[in-house]
Image (cartoon, rainbow, N blue to C red):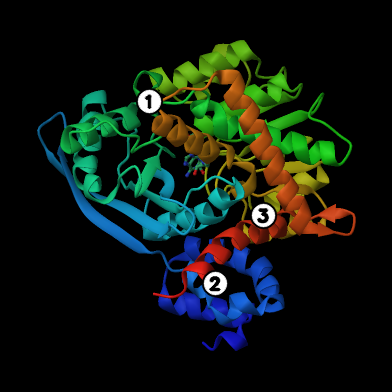
């Protein structure tokens, strides 16, 4: 394609031809291209340098075999990945996901999104994403350990504290990061900050575990504040019950909201009384230690469990999708709107479909896309890297203050580039603000 002919339709047709079947990747690129192409057309230096074409091709994708032995002595084989997307503004940075659905398309969508998200944080981090089609569900602790060690035995060759610094994502929490960090340390014979999300005993940062969920609640608070409102007294629906969902629930509650739902892949619980801090601590223990199902909450606390359903059908003031991609579709968005929902802030990556986003924007719902709203996690990962480099640890208060400043700054950037009359289109704002820094760095380097 001649770059002079840049149009959304032609650009997407070319991308789909080059990457057949990568539907999640196409969706993520479409969401960005829709708002960034008009900006590129208005700024010819980006068009002439083919920046969008270059930004949608990862620097490299590494795919490898992971072999490990289960508790019965069977040899198991999984596929491991690391997509190193863009290191224009810092070392590759982004999580590792262990889930049976993991494939190249999903990791490319996540790595692409990460490029913009990391840019928005203002910290010097490039973008990457990786993982494996390994299913941690039902595996023993020893099996998870052996898998993590086998995975790192290969990944080790491709990462480093100044090259690529992975973190956690779905199915990868502090337990998995610890096993992988231990293996890296054995192989490299050095102690360096090559992973973030580590335990506090060996270089982890305070509030990293909480950061994505907390940041999402702060982003929602900032959107509301900007429109003369707040979380105080609002009924809030949250999906997921993992790392992001539970700490989002914690901060929303601290900010005065009432959280009435959480979910997992089996369904959601509806607690009309609200999920208070005590009940939430029970869930965090259930999910991180006992590794149980959210339905057990309904039995424990005597509330409703809706099997195989998502929480968006219930009336709520604020919605926080915090589970996985494409968990909120057009019908869900219409239901949220008709039930009077005021705002949606995404803890998960790309949880809303393209059609759902359109419904929210058409109805002028405040809509914080994941790349802005969930950037708090990677931001504190960036702060973990800094603490590792200077061999110091900041206090919880210092870190939370920095997190709030970063989320407020991200909101301000979205508002700057997304203002449309009275309305702020946060999708457009996040995409353009995230794009500029990376694109300018790429322009500065020249081609080659
Ligand atoms: P966890 O593994 O801790 O939790 C994931 C939660 O989502 C679980 O409740 C899980 O239920 C549910 N879930 C996962 N897949 C599906 C599915 N296909 N359908 C329904 N529910 C599902 O992951 P995180 O909390 O870390 O991640 C959640 C989201 O947040 C992801 O989109 C991730 O990319 C994003 N994110 C995470 C960051 C982090 O710092 N961890 C940073 C930024 C974004 P079940 O146990 O039944 O599978």
At which x and y percent is residue 333?
A: 72, 50
Is 191 or 105 nearer to us in this picture?
191
Query: In which quadrant of the rendered image does the C terminus lie?
Result: bottom left
Dot 1 corresponds to which residue? Answer: 203
Residue 237 in the figure: left or right of residue 366: left
Is 445 or 353 nearer to us in this picture?
445
Labels 3, 1: front one: 1
At which x and y percent is residue 102?
A: 37, 51
* Circle 1: element type: loop
Dot 3 corresponds to which residue? Answer: 430
Give the quarter of the image for residue 184.
top left
Mark toward the start of the polypeptide (3 vs 1)? 1
Q: Is residue 94 above or below residue 34?
A: above
Mark toward the start of the polypeptide (2 vs 1)? 2
Mark toward the start of the polypeptide (2 vs 3)? 2
* Circle 3: element type: helix
At which x and y percent is residue 375?
A: 58, 42
Spatial CA distance of label 3 from label 1 is 31 Å
Give the quarter of the image for residue 244.
top right
Residue 101 seen in this snapshot = no
Dot 2 corresponds to which residue? Answer: 52
* Extreme residue toward the top, this view: 278
Residue 397 in the figure: left or right of residue 161: right
At which x and y percent is residue 282?
A: 52, 14
Residue 221 in the figure: left or right of residue 135: right
Spatial CA distance of label 2 from label 1 is 37 Å
Labels 2, 1: front one: 1
């Amino acid at each position: 394609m001649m770059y002079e002919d840049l149009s959304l339709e032609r650009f997407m047709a070319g991308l789909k031809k080059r990457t057949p079947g990568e539907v999640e990747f196409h969706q993520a690129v479409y969401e960005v291209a829709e708002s960034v192409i008009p900006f590129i057309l208005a700024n010819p230096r980006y068009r002439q340098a083919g920046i969008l074409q270059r930004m949608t091709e990862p620097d490299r994708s590494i795919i490898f075999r992971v072999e490990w032995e289960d508790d019965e002595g069977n040899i198991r084989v999984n596929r491991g990945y690391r997509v190193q997307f863009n290191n224009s503004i810092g070392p590759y940075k982004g999580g590792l996901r262990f889930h049976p659905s993991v494939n190249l398309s999903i990791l490319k969508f996540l790595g692409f999104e990460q490029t913009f998200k990391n840019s928005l944080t203002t910290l010097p981090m490039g973008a990457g994403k990786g993982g494996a089609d390994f299913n941690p569900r039902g595996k023993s602790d020893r099996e998870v350990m052996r898998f993590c060690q086998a995975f790192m035995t290969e990944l080790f060759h491709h990462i480093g504290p100044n090259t690529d610094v992975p973190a956690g994502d779905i199915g990868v929490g502090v337990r998995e990061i610890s096993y992988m960090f231990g293996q890296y340390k054995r192989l490299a014979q050095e102690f360096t900050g090559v992973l973030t999300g580590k335990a506090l005993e060996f270089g982890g940062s305070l509030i990293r575990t909480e950061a994505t969920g907390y940041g999402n609640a702060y982003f929602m608070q900032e959107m509301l504040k900007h429109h003369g409102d707040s979380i105080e007294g609002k009924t809030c629906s949250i999906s997921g019950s993992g790392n992001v969902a539970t700490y989002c629930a914690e901060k929303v509650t601290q900010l005065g909201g009432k959280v009435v739902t959480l979910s997992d892949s089996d369904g959601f619980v509806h607690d009309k009384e609200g999920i208070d801090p005590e009940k939430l601590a029970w869930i965090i223990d259930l999910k991180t230690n006992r590794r149980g199902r959210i339905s057990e909450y309904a039995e424990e606390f005597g509330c409703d469990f809706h099997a195989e359903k998502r929480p968006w059908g219930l009336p709520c003031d604020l919605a926080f999708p915090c589970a996985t991609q494409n968990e909120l579709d057009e019908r869900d968005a219409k239901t949220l709107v008709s039930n009077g929902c005021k705002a949606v802030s995404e803890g998960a990556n790309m949880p809303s479909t393209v059609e759902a986003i359109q419904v929210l924007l058409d109805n002028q719902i405040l809509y914080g896309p994941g790349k802005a709203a969930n950037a708090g996690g990677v931001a504190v990962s960036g702060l973990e890297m800094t603490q590792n480099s200077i061999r110091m640890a900041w206090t919880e208060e210092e870190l939370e203050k920095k997190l709030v400043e970063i989320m407020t700054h991200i909101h301000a950037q979205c508002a700057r580039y997304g203002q449309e009359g009275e309305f702020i289109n946060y999708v457009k704002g996040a995409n353009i603000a995230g794009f500029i820094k990376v694109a300018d760095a790429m322009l500065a380097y020249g081609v080659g």
